[in-house]
Image (tube, rainbow, N blue to C red):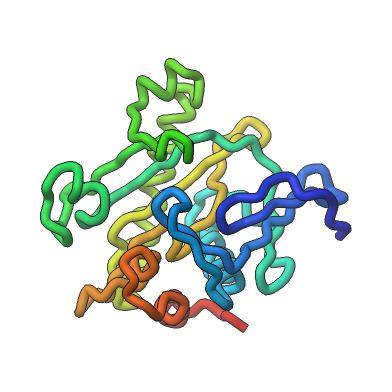
């Protein structure tokens, strides 16, 4: 497959055209950032670890009936994905209280949330990804009412699959964000699922094994990512 021009460069991934109009190449870089890009670093092995972690999780979700953009691994730090029109929203499920929920509502970190909460955020670095509701999304045509319903349905289906997958590996899926796109008239899961976009704790000790290690200067960021991957059975090569 021939790789063409770069179409997009985000904080940690770059996307390229290919000689197939329906397929893009997604390259996971070693870059990492937090706090809307205010804190940045390059972490060796990060791109390859997240790429292969994402490939494994997307495969598990496809088996469970969740439509994804993932087509296959291309290299250690590259994947092929469907070319979609991305919806500019983040869907967040929280199983345990952490992060901004604790700051906004004064909830103690680690509080079990029953039922899990579901939140929507507008993808906008300039606005610091503000929290919105479904009325905003429909009014400003970021997504239709039908698309919003499908996104919510799929987000909770992902929760059912991943909570158990992680628990079987001795891990707690604290929270995570998902992004979706439009592909041939359907809503399809896009972007990535990795410790960059999830909070993952050890089920026994509640040690943080995700990007909070970078945000909070806890150290051993990639070692934690690799530990999660190892427990899940991800082949890191």
- 203 sits left or right of 53 in the view: left
- 231 sits left or right of 11 in the view: left
**Residue situated in front as seen by the camera: 98 or 32:** 32
**Residue situated in front as seen by the camera: 180 or 157:** 180
Q: Is residue 227 above or below residue 163?
A: below
- For residue 163, which quarter of the picture? bottom left
Q: Measuring from the top left, give residue 181's x and y in whole percent.
A: 57, 38
Q: In this view, does 29 lie above or below 87?
A: below
**Residue situated in front as seen by the camera: 112 or 168:** 112
The residue most toward the front is: 38
For the C terminus, the quadrant is bottom right
- Give the tally of numbered discs: 0
Q: Residue at x 31, y 66 (%)?
A: 216
- For residue 27, which quarter of the picture? bottom right
Q: Which residue is drawn at 34% across and 71% down?
A: 217
- 35 sits left or right of 16 in the view: left
Q: Measuring from the top left, give residue 56's x and y in whole percent.
A: 54, 68
Q: Measuring from the top left, give residue 79's x and y in whole percent.
A: 68, 62
Q: Residue at x 36, y 26 (%)?
A: 134
Q: Measuring from the top left, give residue 145's x and y in whole percent.
A: 43, 22
Q: Is residue 66 above or below residue 233?
A: above
Q: Which residue is drawn at 22% across and 47% down?
A: 101
For the N terminus, the quadrant is bottom right
The residue most toward the top is: 139
- For residue 112, which quarter of the picture? bottom left
- 68 sits left or right of 9 in the view: left
């Amino acid at each position: 497959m021939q790789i063409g021009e770069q179409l997009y460069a985000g904080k940690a991934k770059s996307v390229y055209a290919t000689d197939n109009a329906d397929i893009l190449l997604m390259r996971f870089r070693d870059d990492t950032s937090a706090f809307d890009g205010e804190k940045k670093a390059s972490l060796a092995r990060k791109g390859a670890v997240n790429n292969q972690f994402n490939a494994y999780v997307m495969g598990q979700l496809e088996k469970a009936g969740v439509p994804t953009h993932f087509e296959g691994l291309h290299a250690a730090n590259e994947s092929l994905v469907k070319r979609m029109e991305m919806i500019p929203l983040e869907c967040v499920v929280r199983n345990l209280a952490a992060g901004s929920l604790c700051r906004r509502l004064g909830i103690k970190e680690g509080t079990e949330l029953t039922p899990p909460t579901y939140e929507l955020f507008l993808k906008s670095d300039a606005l610091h990804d503000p929290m919105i509701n479904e009325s905003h999304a429909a009014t400003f045509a970021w997504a239709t009412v039908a698309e919003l319903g499908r996104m919510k349905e799929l987000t909770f289906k992902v929760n059912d699959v991943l909570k158990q997958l992680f628990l079987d590996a001795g891990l707690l899926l604290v929270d995570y964000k998902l992004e979706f796109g439009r592909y041939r008239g359907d809503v399809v899961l896009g972007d990535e699922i990795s410790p960059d976009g999830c909070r993952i704790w050890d089920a026994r000790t509640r040690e943080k094994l995700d990007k909070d290690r970078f945000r909070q200067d806890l150290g051993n960021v990639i070692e934690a990512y690799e530990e999660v991957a190892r427990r899940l059975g991800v082949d890191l090569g």
